[in-house]
Amino acid sequence: MVNDNIVCSAMDLLQHRNTRLQTHHAPVPNCLFLGSHFYTQMYYDAGNTYRYLPRQPRGVDVFAFDRVYIMLHHPHLMHFTLACVDMRNRCFFHFDSIGDNPALQEQGVLDHLACWLHDHARNRLSPTDPVFARVADATSWPKRYTATSVTQQRWGSNDCGIMSSMFAALHSINQSLTFDNNLHVARKALAHAILSKRIE
C-alpha cells in the first residue's frame, strides 16, 4: 500500500511531465497536479468542515490551467481517490477505484472543491476579469462521479493509491481509464519513475 509521500511524488513527476510536453507543444491539456495534502488542509478538523485556503497551490495561477488534478486521501476509509477540475469544460470529475463510495459523495468531495474554486476566484480575481465570469459560478458546474466506468481495483487489494496515480497519468493525456488491474508492472514502473525522477 502506498502512502501520501509516494502519491505526492507521483503527482510531482506528472507535473514535470506535463511541463515537458507543453514545452514540446504536445496536443495535451495544460494541467496542474496537487498532492493529497492540499485537500486535507481544506478542513478545520478531522471532520468535513470546509475552509477556504487563500494561498496559491504550488505558487501558481490555477486559472491558467485547463485541468487541475487533486489527489484525495480519505483517512477514515484508508483510501485514495482522484478529483479533476476541468476548467475548459467547466465541470468536476471524481475517479474512484472502488466505484465511488456513497460516503464520499455524501461528504461532498466535489462540492468542497467547487466552493474552493468559487472562493478562490472571488479572492484572486477582479469581477471585471473575463476569467472571473467564467469560473464564478463553479458551484453550479456539473459534478461527475465515475462509478464503475473506470477500472476497479481487485477485491482485497490496497491498490487505490497506485490506481489514482494512473488515473491522473492517463486522463491528463486524454487516454482511456480502462486497463489491466493486475498492477505488478505498474508498481515497478512507479518505483522506477520515483527513483529516476522522471515519468513517461
Image (cartoon, helix red, strand yellow):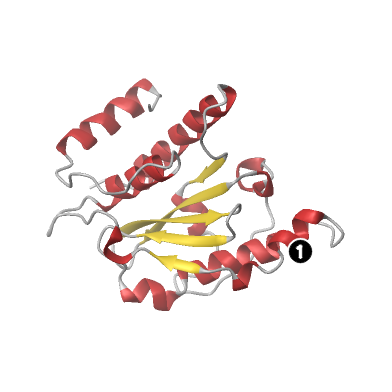
- Left or right, residue 198 beside residue 111: left
Q: Element at badge 1?
A: helix
- Extreme residue in the right direction: 128
User: Residue 185, position in %: x, y?
Assistant: 18, 33
**Which one is in front, 124 or 144?**
144
* Residue that label 1 marks: 122
Q: Kindly identify the residue that appears in the image at 44 percent across and 38 percent down.
A: 173
Residue 64, given in percent of the width and then of the height, sits at 68, 44
Residue under the point 64% across and 65% down? 52
- Counting labels gives 1
| Vertical relation: 107 (above or below) 145 | below
The reply to whether residue 158 is visible in this rendering is yes
Residue 92 drawn above or below residue 4 = below
Which residue is the extreme one toward the bottom? Answer: 106
Q: Label 1 is placed on what type of residue?
A: Arg
Asked if 147 appears above or below 194 in the picture, the reply is below
Q: Residues within 10 Å of mark 1 (few under 14, many from 20)?
A: some
Q: Position of residue 96 (x, y in %)?
A: 32, 60
Quarter of the view holding residue 200: top left
Q: In the image, 129: left or right of 26?
A: right
Residue at left 45%, top 60%? Answer: 93
Q: Which image quadrant for residue 50?
A: bottom right
